[in-house]
Amino acid sequence: MSFCLLSNHVHLLVQTPEANLSKMMQPFQTSYTAYFNKRHGRTGHVFEQRYKAMVVDKDNYLLQVSRYIHLNPVSARIVERPQDFRWSSYGAYLKGKGLTGLKTESVLGYFSGSKSRQIRQYRDYVEGGRAGKSRNPTPEVIKQMFIGDEDFVEVVRREGKRSIVNGARYSFRQIVDVVCEVMGTEREEISHPKRSEKVQRSREMLCYIARGYGEVGLPELARFLQVKERSTASHAVR
């Protein structure tokens, strides 16, 4: 639906017919990285961190998220107008000519009239109308996973669609149990400040999986690991 590629990260607004976003993102962050680095003589990561995925309330927040993505280069002071930034889908929206794989109908469909009128209305919405004031409020995220209100979050949970975000999500207890089983350690060992090298690796693995695949915040991780600084968990992930 919408995209914007910046120097160290990319924003994507996509619609998946199935809860299989992770299957798309895995080759994007591996195969594409290998291709990009080979082409440009680089090494290491192309994007700074593992991707973060959020479920968007399409009925009420789709337009806001699309606007936020297209105004990112303006907010970052790279360009003065969003249409001046080459590496986003905004130009295709204004020209009415889609790029391969880009579907604008879902976003433009929120406006009435002919397609040309829809494009004008969307441009006014993104750029702030005739006053030329580009406002780009950040969409509010609930529980680090949802862009919508509490009712939307409850509906998604009730319908069992949480797996659309980063693949399946697991409880902290599940993650601890599996790490202990795989690494051959005990729960009490992982949570104890005094530890061997094997236990230290177990703690790092726990942090990585908990942050990537579980609904676990840094405060909870810090309490379990018995450390004062939340950054300890962040360093373990890296």
Image: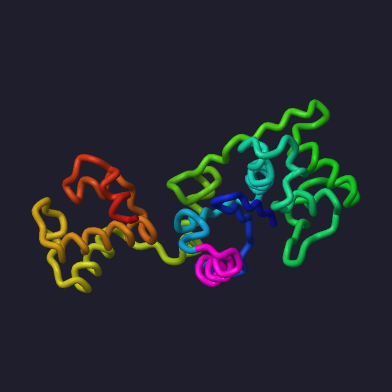
Decide if residue 26 is on the left or right side of residue 126: left
Query: In the image, is 7 to the left or to the right of 128?
Result: left
> Residue drawn at (78%, 57%), measured in percent from left and top?
105
Q: Quadrant of residue 73?
A: top right
Outermost residue to the top: 131
| 123 vs 150, nearest the viewer | 123
| Above/below status of 41 relative to 125 | below
Taking the spot 89% from the left edge, 47% from the top edge, the residue there is 113
Q: Is residue 24 visible?
A: no
Q: How is the image coloured?
A: rainbow
Region rendered in magenta: 26-42
Q: Residue most toward the front?
A: 41
Q: Where does the C terminus fall, quadrant-wise?
A: bottom left
| Callout count | 0
Q: How far across and how far down the image is residue 162, in percent?
A: 47, 60
Q: Name the residue at the left extreme.
A: 194
User: Looking at the rendering, which quadrant does residue 125 occupy?
Assistant: top right
30 drawn magenta: yes
Could you tell me which residue is drawn at 61 percent across and 56 percent down? Answer: 12
Quarter of the image for the N terminus: give it: bottom right
Q: State whether residue 128 is above or below residue 24.
A: above
Magenta: predominant secondary structure element? helix
Task: Work out whether residue 166 can be spotted.
Answer: yes
> Can you tell which quarter of the image residue 205 is in?
bottom left
> In the rendered view, does 148 fall on the left or right side of 129?
left
Picture coordinates of residue 103, whole percent (x, y): 75, 61
Specify whether residue 48 is painted magenta: no
